[in-house]
């Protein structure tokens, strides 16, 4: 967003906020959930799509119905192995797409997994221009019903938060999606922090901010304060791997540290120099993720506390 557009946007919200702060809060929530147009691609993105065309053509495409509309899903199978093997659901982040998860999908296929990648609402081939946690979790639940059960979930950025909330059952009326393993890559820890930052970005008044944050409980059935990753993870006993780059400029490393401290069932792998998006294309990270998903140990406490779980994974040098 240009500086001029930012001034215009803030000026507009400032005027509305002064006259009707409740309206400003509701409009802020609509803007917060608005997804970028999937048709507007950079030259780099166009090159990526072109290079990944054969990869995407190898997938079987499904159209799933949810209470929020239809979403697209892609089923990848290693046809040289069993098609009825355990399935991993892969979820990409905001303004991303399945092609960005290629390295991880291919590493999982090599391990004998069937992989499902989901286009969340407002992304890829799925309809709409609105996305929030309840819509995303509903899409995951639909994918579990039609293409599951899922042995594990792997999510990047916003997709990591969606995976955690789907497993934790944080949305009222949507049952938890059971998995054996969970991987969160470059994922944010606390949704309340994102709401605070967005409110500061728009310079909302305290009353407008309260309305903005209150929309979460209206649509999710649970308050915004419930959406804190480290708290959700501490209530689960699912072995979880946190993968994060210390130099991530979009999601700070402190988020990963907070979630890694949630319990002995949570491990962390640091990926120096790989930032927020390059981390997905790194073959070493892809191998680490696939090996963690494939490991059958049930608890991190199966190994000594001072020795991280990832040191015991069968990762080739």
Image (tube, grey):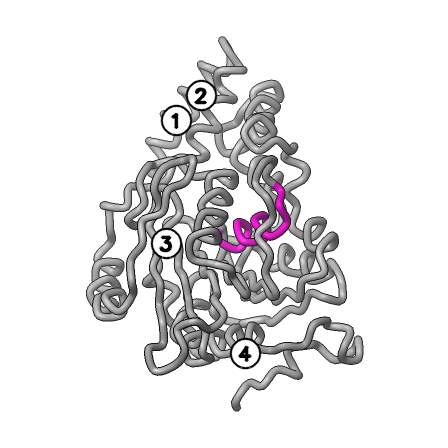
Main SS of the magenta segment? Answer: helix
Q: Is residue 94 left or right of residue 40?
A: right
Badge 1: few (under 14), some or many (20 or more) residues near its Cα, within 10 Å?
some
Q: Which residue is mark 4?
A: 291
Indicate which disc, 2 or 3, sits on the residue closer to the N terminus: 2
C-alpha distance separating marks 1 and 2: 6 Å
Percent across and percent down for residue 135 are 46, 39
Q: Are marks 1 and 2 in contact (CB under 8 Å)?
A: yes
C-alpha distance separating marks 1 and 3: 25 Å
C-alpha distance separating marks 1 and 4: 46 Å
Q: Which residue is mark 2?
A: 13
Percent across and percent down for residue 295 are 60, 78
SS for callout 4: helix
Indicate which disc, 1 or 4, sits on the residue closer to the N terminus: 1
Q: Are marks 1 and 4 in contact (CB under 8 Å)?
A: no
Q: Nearer the viewer, mark 4 or mark 3?
A: 4
In the image, what residue occupies the spot 42% across and 66% down? 115
SS for callout 3: loop
Q: Nearer the viewer, mark 2 or mark 4?
A: 4
Tell me if residue 165 is in the magenta stretch: yes
Q: Write the start and end of the magenta stretch as one range.
A: 159-170
Indicate which disc, 2 or 4, sits on the residue closer to the N terminus: 2
Percent across and percent down for residue 198 are 52, 35
Residue 288's place in the image compared with 219, above or below, is below
Q: Nearer the viewer, residue 79 or 269?
A: 79
Residue 117's place in the image compared with 274, above or below, is above
């Amino acid at each position: 967003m240009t500086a001029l557009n930012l001034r215009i946007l803030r000026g507009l919200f400032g005027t509305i906020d002064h006259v009707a702060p409740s309206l400003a809060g509701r409009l802020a929530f609509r803007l917060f959930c608005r997804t970028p147009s999937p048709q507007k691609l950079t030259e780099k993105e166009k090159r990526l799509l072109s290079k990944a065309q054969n990869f995407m053509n190898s997938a079987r495409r499904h159209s799933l119905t949810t209470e929020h509309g239809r979403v697209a899903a892609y089923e990848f199978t290693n046809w040289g192995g069993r098609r009825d093997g355990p399935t991993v659901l892969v979820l990409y982040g905001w303004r991303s797409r399945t092609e960005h998860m290629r390295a991880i999908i291919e590493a999982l296929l090599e391990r004998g997994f069937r992989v499902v990648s989901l286009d969340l609402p407002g992304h890829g081939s799925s309809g709409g221009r609105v996305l929030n946690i309840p819509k995303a979790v509903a899409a995951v639940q639909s994918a579990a019903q039609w293409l599951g059960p899922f042995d594990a979930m792997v999510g990047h950025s916003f997709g990591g938060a969606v995976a955690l909330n789907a497993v934790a059952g944080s949305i009222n009326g949507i049952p938890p999606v059971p998995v054996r393993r969970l991987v969160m890559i470059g994922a944010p820890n606390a949704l309340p922090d994102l709401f605070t930052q967005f409110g500061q970005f728009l310079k909302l008044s305290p009353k407008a901010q309260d309305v903005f944050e209150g929309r979460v409980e209206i649509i999710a059935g649970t308050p915004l304060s419930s959406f804190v990753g480290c708290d959700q993870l501490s209530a689960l006993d699912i072995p979880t791997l946190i993968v994060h780059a210390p130099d991530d400029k979009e999601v700070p490393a402190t988020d990963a540290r907070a979630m890694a401290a949630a319990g002995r069932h949570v491990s962390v792998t640091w990926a120096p120099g790989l930032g927020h998006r390059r981390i997905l294309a790194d073959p070493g990270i892809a191998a680490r993720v696939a090996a963690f998903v494939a490991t059958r140990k049930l608890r991190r406490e199966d190994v000594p506390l001072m020795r991280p779980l990832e040191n015991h994974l069968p990762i080739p040098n």
